[in-house]
Amino acid sequence: MSTGPALVPSSDDSTSSVLIAIKINFTLNTPDGLRRVIFGLEKDTQADAVVWKINFQLFERDHKTDDFGDAIVTLDVEVDIALHANAEAAAQNGLTPPQSAHALGPASDDAKAAQAGQMDTGDAKQTVQNTLTASDSQ
Amino acid sequence: MKRAALCFVQSVVVCVVASTACFAQTEVAPGKIIAFNGCSSTTNFETGNYRVRSSQVDDPFAFLWLVKRKKSDLSAKIRSLVDGKPFQYEVAVNQALQLIEAEKFLSDSADVRVQVSLEFLTVEHCQGLELDLVYHVYSTQIPQVLSGTPESRSTEKKAPQQTVGQTEAGSPIHLAPSGGYNASERASGGGRLEIQPRGADWLPFRSFTVEGQGSSAMRFVSAGLKGGKDSQGWLAHSEWIVNYESSSSPTNAGNFSRGTFSGQFSAVTKAFANGNLTGRFGFLIGGGNLQSSLQNVNMASNTVPNTGYFSSKVYAGISSRLPHNVFATSYGLELGSTSGTGMDWRKHIGDVQHEFWYPVGDHHIIEVESRFTVGALEVPGMVPVSERFFGGGSEELFFPGDSWRIRANPVIRAIPANRFYLTADGAGAEDFLSYNLTAAWAAWRKPLFPSDLSRDADFTRLLNGQIHTATSIEQNDFASKDQHFGDLVRRLPAVQKDLEDLKSVVQSAEIASHGQFVAEFKACASSIGVASSRVRSALGAKDGMQYGDVRALLPVDKNEDRLQRVLSACGDRLNGQLKSPEITASLGTLDSEFQRVQTDFLGIDQQQASCRATQEMAFVHRTLNTLIKEVNMFSISPVVVFDVAHIGPAKNGLGGTRYGPGGGIRFALASTVNFTLGYAWNPQHQPAEGPGAMFFSLQTRDLFH
């Protein structure tokens, strides 16, 4: 069970204001402007129950002057309880270099492969979720 | 005694609250106490049978017309969804947040590297089984280029929405009226119209601007085409402008008229010196005609009243932004000719600008703006009289455009525009210096971001998290530009070939194995497939995206580590039992390439990439901090001014030094209107200059925002 900082002033257990949901979307554009990843983190709090969700969307286009249009891939992942602390840290502190590299690289590739039927959707969701644990191992 | 009384009051409150909680039949965790009329983070508001009394949407940029309209539409939708109804998490959270997402408060721009949108929902005023819902919406985008120039500091105060990318995607037309008054030019009015066609990024010019200002005594009109480009190299931003300008400005002895056509290029470098400095440079080539109707004044013998002319200008400067200071220094050189051949005059301009601001109390900002400008004119031939220096309360710029303002005349607010010009040589100075000090204190103000929010440590951390994400992206890009990464990428085709060879050898071995080691063969083939996929993606990508795919091949990414997985699945687990010499040889080749790739990756100077990314984002970090913690929605500030100006050559009261103390008031309403009104005295005045002057300048909001 994760109980992270409140993000609003004076939201201890008995106040006039209680936070019950956070949604933060990181939209990452590649330098060539041809690929966009939206890595969304959502925290819902129902009493003592906390649920973290990842909303992953991938957009691609052939030319920078084209519109991105609709997402070519959309994946919604409910974050494992074991990774709630990672989700909280990412929402609070932003994405680290390994996390942003993972989101733009393997997570996007696998999400796209799942959409094309070349990969199991569950595996792709796992790769997307791995964004939260991506770190430099040395 | 006092402590005993306090304990008694606390006991009563606990009893009242406990009975209220029981009556409300909410699910309260044991040991939790709900404040009277308050909400508890441990309450399940759905099973507790709460109803939604009211809902509201909170966005600090709602002062913008389009944001306000979106907020209004959104509020209406959310009200119809939740108000007066039983609280349900699915409706209040999921459905309402989807409505917010659909509104798209940020423009859809791929020119920024990172956009962050944050929405959070709070429950407030839980009372009598009713509650209020507040949806907070904060959206930011981190631009690729955000310079530390005084001009950008000015923008963040007057139009803070631009700093965080809250410009409207649906508004290609920008119109901003302006106005002013000084004794020479009298009350003037005008405006600026800019048209930026959408989807015209491929054109060399992306905007068309017309600007004008007029009064019974002056007129100014300019029209220009402007293009620009951001880049990842050392030149962060470059822009080019083709401009036509026509003007007539008064002195007390006649008017100047000017018609000029020019082309210019200017550029801003990436931040350097630990992210503390940016450089700027540019050049301009132009020509036209300069006319004057000065009467009853002497003119120097090397001066002509009317002439055609050509000139070229070069300019360079550096600027810096620290947490509470911006500093800029610029130098400009103009080479002019009245004949088109040879050089008739050289003009040197030095301009130093400093602004300091500091909050004294919550958002009560003290601002001190200083500007020191010097100029000198060398005349080997003939110079148009209007190219000499004419001082007063109006600023002339060294070149057109508003992204870099180099002042080119002596400014003293105590003297009407163009009235400080009589020197020992005649009309117009050959050298000058001026110093202008303006100090203001925001006595009355309303913060742009609510004070309790901007002071909140968690919110500050979240904002810093946005910067951190943007810095991460930059760091990966810089790492991908490292020479070792380039070497690594050149090895990828060899890695791809090694994987294909291994796959082929394993397939042959599987056929020959007659159904043995099925699971091991499957795991090996799967690992080769994923690794090959990562290599293909890496070869088809570039920059930061390529970096992510390459990283996934190596042990540095412990979740992926795809090449090591191939070696493990096909080597240890499969070939450890199969003992195939062909697979052993193929794995050996792949392992050798893997070691070389690994060595290349470890050679990337991550520390330098991190430092460069941090430097790159330093200005952004400081700017956003200022915006959140110091910028006001509106403010009224008493103002003190003090000017000193000198023109030469000076003799017998002609030319010389003037001082101009004064005061006034400044009113600023973010993105809507800014004006400063005041009066400055000229205690040592000459007859043409007057004893003092009122100064007034007005800028209004973009009417289409």
Image (spheres, coloured by chain):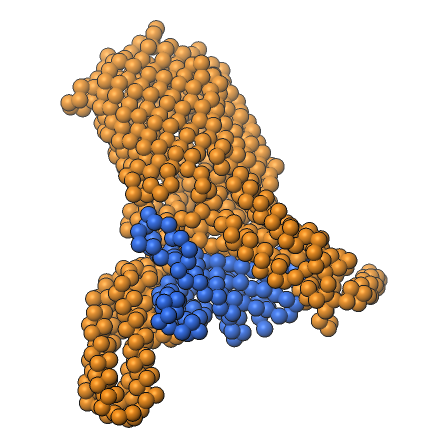
Chain colours: A blue, B orange
Residue at the left extreme? B341
Choose between B118 and B408: the one closer to the eye: B118
- Specify the quadrant of the image occupied by residue A104: bottom left
B581 left or right of A63 in image: left
Q: Determine which quarter of the picture holds residue A128.
A: bottom left
Nearest to the observer: residue B479 or residue B665? B479
Expressed as whole percent of the image width and height from the top left, the position of residue B369 reads 46, 35
| Tally of marks | 0
Q: Is residue B544 visible?
A: yes
Front-most of residues B557 and A62: A62
Residue that appears at 21% across and 83% down: B505
Give B700 or B308, whichever is nearer the viewer.
Answer: B700
Q: Position of residue B182 (x, y in %)?
A: 47, 19
Question: Residue B544: x percent and y percent?
Answer: 33, 61
The answer to whether A97 appears left or right of B443 in the picture is: left
Compared with B138, B264 (above or below) is above
Asked if residue B259 is positioned above or below residue A63 in the image, the reply reads above
Quarter of the figure with the N terminus of chain B: bottom right
Q: Residue at x 20, y 79 (%)?
A: B501
Above or below, B351 against B495 in this view is above
Tell me the residue at 15%/22% (across/down): B341
